[in-house]
């Protein structure tokens, strides 16, 4: 049975757009797959994390303290997703990658958030994929694919259907600017996936047909990153 790590952006979990109905449908879709695929879900913090980090930054908190609040937000989202899976969840939100691996059970889903300060849940997903020797990482995000530039700013931006790890790394290595690239995958995660030759499927996380196809390793409208 292949293992799949899904990086679920906070922008997918709690955009405040029918989130309860979406999470119910997402859980049903994941449950329909988890006898054939060992699924791990790593949840991002989204708006919740950004809000706390913004207010905390205004108060002059340290980067470590801000990251700590970001991590708590990701774990709160993870708890929401785990509860929505009910009996299919392993019943505990692990706080590190080794614990996540230990909690793995056939037919059950491990759901977690962040781990330690200094990175994002995309990086956690790549570290977890490396630890459990996952067949692929699925990045369910707020954009529908990787583009040559930010499609919201550049009408000439081209959608990329298949790219190499090096191309992804170059795309996300342009710095912290531009909403497009930062939503595609994070740099540390891209580096780990490149070093360990782990495929990444980048799809719109709110499109459950796309998410299902990506988890199954089937063709997607989004971007497939491979060697
Ligand atoms: P996210 O993984 O949601 O970060 O973690 P992000 O990429 O900024 O969010 P999206 O994908 O655009 O929605 C939120 C914040 O939590 C802290 C970081 O400060 C991060 O920016 N965090 C998260 C950590 O410090 N360590 C972790 O393992 C995870």
Image: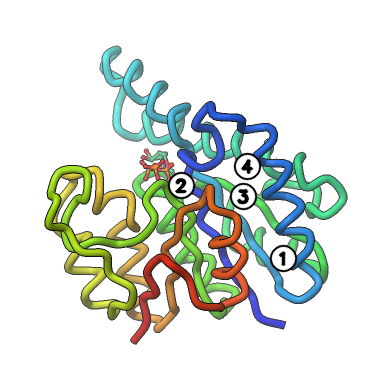
Write down which quadrant ligand 1 falls in.
top left
Is disc 4 placed on a helix, strand or loop?
helix
Give the Cα distance between marks 4 and 3.
5 Å
Q: How crowded is mark 3: few (under 14 residues within 10 Å), some or many (20 or more)?
A: many
Task: State the quadrant of the C terminus.
Answer: bottom left
Residue plotted at (30% across, 27% down): 62
Q: Which of marks 3 and 1 is nearer the N terminus?
A: 1
Q: Residue lying furthest right in this view?
A: 87
Q: How crowded is mark 1: few (under 14 residues within 10 Å), some or many (20 or more)?
A: few
Q: Name the residue under label 1.
A: 102
Q: Which of marks 4 and 3 is nearer the N terminus?
A: 4
Q: Residue lying furthest bottom in this view?
A: 227
Q: Do the numbered discs 4 and 3 sit on residues whose CB atoms are within 8 Å?
A: yes
Residue plotted at (66% across, 52% down): 111
In this rendering, position of residue 188 left or right of residue 210: left
Say which mark, if any, is on residue 116: 2
Along the line of sight, the residue nearer the viewer: 113 or 39: 39
Say which mark, if any, is on residue 72: none
User: Which label lies toward us, 2 or 4?
Assistant: 4
Give the Cα distance between marks 3 and 1.
13 Å
Q: Which of marks 2 and 1 is nearer the N terminus?
A: 1
Residue plotted at (22% across, 60% down): 172
């Amino acid at each position: 049975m292949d293992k799949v790590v899904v990086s679920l952006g906070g922008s997918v979990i709690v955009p405040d757009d029918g989130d309860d109905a979406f999470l119910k449908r997402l859980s049903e879709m994941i449950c329909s797959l988890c006898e054939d695929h060992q699924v791990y879900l790593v949840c991002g913090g989204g708006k919740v994390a950004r809000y706390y980090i913004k207010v905390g930054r205004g108060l002059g908190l340290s980067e470590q303290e801000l990251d700590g609040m970001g991590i708590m937000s990701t774990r709160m989202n993870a708890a929401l997703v785990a509860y929505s899976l009910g009996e299919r969840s392993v019943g505990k939100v692990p706080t590190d990658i080794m614990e996540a691996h230990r909690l793995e059970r056939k037919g059950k889903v491990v759901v977690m958030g962040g781990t330690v300060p200094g990175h994002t849940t995309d990086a956690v997903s790549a570290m977890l994929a490396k630890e459990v020797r996952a067949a692929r990482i699925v990045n369910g995000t707020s954009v529908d694919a990787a583009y040559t530039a930010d499609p919201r700013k550049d009408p000439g931006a081209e959608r990329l259907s298949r790219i190499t790890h090096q191309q992804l790394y170059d795309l996300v290595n342009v710095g912290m600017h531009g909403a497009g690239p930062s939503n595609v995958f994070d740099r540390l995660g891209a580096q780990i996936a490149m070093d360990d030759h782990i495929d990444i499927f980048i799809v719109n996380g709110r499109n459950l047909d796309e998410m299902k196809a990506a988890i199954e390793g089937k063709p997607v409208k989004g971007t497939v990153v491979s060697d």
